[in-house]
Image: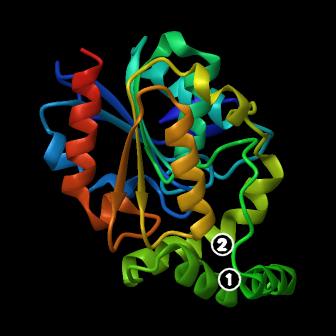
Amino acid sequence: MLTVGNDRLWVDDSGGDGPAVLLVHPGIHDSSVWDPVLPLLEDHRLVRYDARDFGRSSPSSEEFLPMADLLAVLDHVGLERAHLVGNSMGGQNTLAAALEHPERVLSLTLLAPGIKGYDYPDDAPELEQEWEEVASSGDQARMVELYGRVWCASGVDDAIRDQLVAMVAAEERHDGFEQDNPEQWSRAGDIAVPTAVMIGELDLPSMVTGSLDLAGRIPGAELVRLAGVDHLPSLREPQAVADVVRRTVARAG
């Protein structure tokens, strides 16, 4: 466990002498989202952690900056630099780290990343309306159902449903303490490390558009589109994710 301010983060480090890869989970799942990928990259040093309010980490009790927690994890495991892999919220955190602290980042593999400062297009008007209605109702069961339908179009099993239930229960507390990372979209062209952007074709149309635009803005970025995959590529196509991580790490030399 890593102490950050008044809170604690669960950190897992495989050790070893292979390329160091930090895996950063999305906002609808804890770090177990990477479980299917771990054995496919066993020759790498794999580090992952649960963000505050997720998995085995403590509830947040104070304001925190997600990017700062990411860097604290690197310090905790003794890594000056690492290859960063992030999904959704985790992708946005890794983007922030690459722009604010480029000396700490060897490469980026971004899975359906959030992009601070990007003007996402509207999705279907009926979805936007339903989202507002469900959020204002405070009905956690309806929110779990909606999140599953929106973010997990490839299917919701018991394990994913448990993750959504935990996330919805902690969301208000997490959002109340989490501070915004620095803006990223206007500076994405400054990223100079090897980068890959992955997006599932079943993800929200706005997320697909954002990933396509981001890949076009980062110099030399590889774009990977996955058919039949939603917002969680590491669960749906772990081999494809592992292959892209390997290629991106290799490009960094």
Residue type at numbered disc 2: Val
Q: Earlier in the sequence, mark 1 or mark 2?
A: 1
Quadrant location of residue 188? top right
Q: Nearer the viewer, residue 117 or 58?
A: 117
User: Secondary structure under badge 2?
Assistant: helix
User: Is 112 rendered above or below residue 42?
Assistant: below
For image coordinates 32% across by 64% down, the residue present is 235
The quarter holding residue 84 reads: top left
Q: Which residue is mark 1?
A: 143
**Side (left or right) of 133 relative to 219:** right
Q: Is residue 244 above or below residue 142?
A: above
C-alpha span from label 1 to label 2: 7 Å
- Nearer to us in this view, 199 or 90: 199
Q: 160 and 117: which one is in front?
A: 117
Q: Tell me what residue is drawn at x 59 percent, y 37 percent.
A: 93
Quadrant where the image shows the C terminus:
top left
Q: Amino acid at mark 1?
A: Met
Number of the label disc, if any, that sits on residue 168: 2
Q: Position of residue 114 (x, y in %)?
A: 61, 49
Circle 1: element type: helix
Q: Residues within 10 Å of mark 2 (few under 14, many from 20)?
A: some
Q: Position of residue 135 (x, y in %)?
A: 80, 79
Residue 76 position (above or below residue 237): above
Q: Is residue 84 left or right of residue 142?
A: left
Q: Which residue does the image show at 28% across and 55% down from the upper left?
A: 35
Q: Position of residue 2 (x, y in %)?
A: 51, 31
Would residue 6 be visible to someone looking at this image?
no
